[in-house]
Image (cartoon, rainbow, N blue to C red):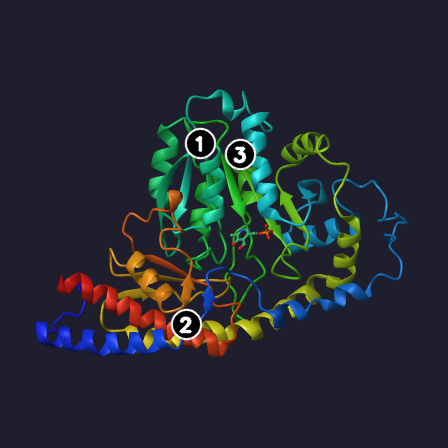
């Protein structure tokens, strides 16, 4: 990327002056806009208020009283629903609490403390544990592995998924590479979906470590923005067919279907993996919130109803994503100062600004009253080696605020580049 190709120094200075005036005028407006986290907006949350109208009785279809202890791995209604949604058997499923992130944390903690199914020893007994981290990625994933002292290796994300040639080469040689984070559908933040070839190769590749595990965080599996959704291959079946049945653990939740923090989360894997981890989890809880599971099963009803419900989310979100694209296009295209993705779903737009300018851009925006996710957050240890990636989370603010925030961002992107190339 060569920014402002063909611009003379005078033209660059003129542009900088124009933008500085614009920036100062934004600063005077006393803006307070927060674009930092991918949360549903109030209108989206309102779509699920019907959840509370299903409390007439709290017994499952087979007569189990959800107010009491029991059915620790989830009630049948929810298991049946998720099994159909993800085309897996109920024996391959565990319904946990409200948070998939919590289940992922717990899996890593168990891998370290006790070992998972098929491990010779827990990872805590090893000198070194390394994880592959497709980047840009989800800061909270990287925070978990950082906490456990895992060495994280950046794997670049391409338009078809993570660099699979690099992954195959690394895992075939290094026994200390024990795992990999992944957000295979409408990835956070790049919005890409892993191609069939990538999924097949992840399932079948030879790994030096027999206890190599993939964390398949399918957080955005249902979150399409358009009627022509991306499609993701079924990694659980592919792993089984490739002779690596225990390689993958899939996660998801209804956090952005119903209510974040008050939804239901699940983990799916081979029967043996689920059987094994159920024994471990049974030591830490007598069971999760089955009242909430029942209300969800009654409210979400079936696969067709969920699809209709998600279309209502998409109707609210589409104009927001399109507003961001329109403003980025209007202000930044043709200058070679930034590039961005146009995802078919998910919660984010990933903006790559001119190398060395992300931190400065986010700082300028903050000083003008617009908060973005800190630059670097999409990389392990919060360090983006190119200082280039900025995650835009368009879902929460109203469209009018979002438009202002992105206009401000565009001014800051250009100012940061101009500062760098005029220095
Ligand atoms: C990729 C990804 N995984 C997990 C989560 C959190 O999910 P949960 O609410 O189920 O813990 C998020 C939230 O933003 C996310 O982006």
> Would you say the residues marked 1 and 2 are in contact, meaning their CB atoms lie under 8 Å apart?
no
Which residue is rendered at x = 29% and y = 67% of the image?
413
Question: In the rendering, at what x and y percent does residue 420 appear?
Answer: 18, 61
Identify the residue shown where x is 37% and y is 57%.
Answer: 159
In front: mark 3 or mark 1? 1
Q: Considering only order in the chain, which callout, 2 or 1, is on the residue closer to the N terminus?
A: 1
Visible in this render: residue 410? yes
Image-based side of 412 in relation to 319, left or right = left
Q: State the residue position of label 3.
A: 244
Image side of residue 415 versus residue 174, left or right = left
Query: Going by the image, does 347 lie left or right of 48?
Result: left
Image vertical order of residue 9 relative to residue 127, above or below:
below
Quarter occupied by the N terminus: bottom left
Relative depth, front residue between 376 and 293: 376
Task: Mark 2: give few (<14), some (14-19) or many (20+) Cα within 10 Å.
Answer: many
Q: Nearer the viewer, mark 1 or mark 2?
A: 2
Query: Residue 200, how many percent across, how many down?
Result: 47, 45
Image quadrant where one finds the C terminus? bottom left
Query: What's the CA distance linking mark 2 and mark 3?
Result: 46 Å
* Residue highlighted by disc 2: 405
The residue wearing badge 1 is 149
Q: Which mark is residue 169?
A: none
Label 3: few (<14), some (14–19) or many (≥20) C-alpha neighbours in 10 Å: some
As helix, strand or loop, the secondary structure at mark 2 comes to helix
* Mark in front: 2 vs 3: 2
Q: Secondary structure at mark 3?
A: loop
């Amino acid at each position: 990327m060569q920014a402002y190709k063909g611009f003379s120094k005078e033209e660059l200075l003129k542009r900088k002056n124009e933008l500085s005036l614009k920036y100062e005028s934004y600063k005077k407006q006393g803006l307070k806009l927060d674009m930092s986290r991918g949360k549903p907006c109030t209108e989206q949350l309102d779509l699920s208020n019907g959840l509370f109208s299903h409390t007439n009785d709290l017994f499952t279809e087979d007569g189990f009283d959800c107010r009491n202890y029991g059915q620790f791995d989830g009630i049948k209604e929810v298991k049946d629903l998720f099994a159909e949604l993800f085309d897996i058997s109920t024996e391959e499923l565990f319904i946990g609490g409200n948070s998939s992130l919590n289940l992922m944390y717990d899996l890593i903690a168990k891998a370290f403390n006790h070992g998972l199914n098929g491990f010779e020893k827990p990872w805590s007994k090893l000198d070194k544990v390394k994880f592959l981290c497709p980047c840009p990625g989800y800061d909270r994933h990287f925070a978990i592995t950082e906490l456990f002292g895992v060495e994280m290796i950046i794997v670049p994300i391409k338009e078809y998924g993570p660099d699979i040639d690099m992954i195959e080469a690394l895992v075939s040689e290094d026994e200390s590479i024990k795992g990999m984070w992944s957000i295979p559908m409408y990835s956070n933040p790049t919005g890409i979906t892993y191609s069939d070839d990538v999924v097949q190769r992840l399932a079948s590749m030879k790994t030096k470590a027999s206890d190599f595990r993939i964390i398949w965080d399918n957080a955005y599996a249902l979150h399409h923005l358009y009627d022509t959704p991306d499609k993701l291959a079924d990694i659980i079946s592919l792993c089984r067919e490739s002779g690596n049945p225990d390689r993958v653990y899939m996660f998801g939740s209804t956090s952005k279907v119903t209510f974040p923090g008050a939804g239901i989360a699940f983990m799916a894997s081979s029967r043996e993996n689920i059987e094994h981890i159920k024994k471990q989890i049974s030591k830490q809880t007598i069971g999760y919130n089955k009242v909430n599971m029942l209300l969800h099963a009654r409210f979400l009803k079936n696969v067709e109803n969920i699809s209709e419900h998600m279309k209502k989310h998409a109707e609210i979100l589409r104009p927001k994503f399109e507003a961001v694209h329109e403003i980025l296009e209007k202000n930044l295209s043709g200058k070679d100062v930034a590039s961005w993705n146009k995802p078919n779903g998910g919660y984010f737009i990933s903006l790559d600004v001119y190398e060395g300018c992300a931190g400065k851009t986010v700082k300028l925006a903050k000083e003008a009253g617009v908060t973005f996710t800190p630059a670097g957050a999409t990389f392990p240890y919060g360090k983006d080696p190119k200082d280039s990636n900025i995650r835009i989370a368009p879902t929460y603010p109203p469209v009018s605020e979002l438009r202002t925030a992105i206009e401000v961002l565009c001014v800051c992107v250009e100012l940061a580049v101009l500062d760098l190339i005029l220095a």
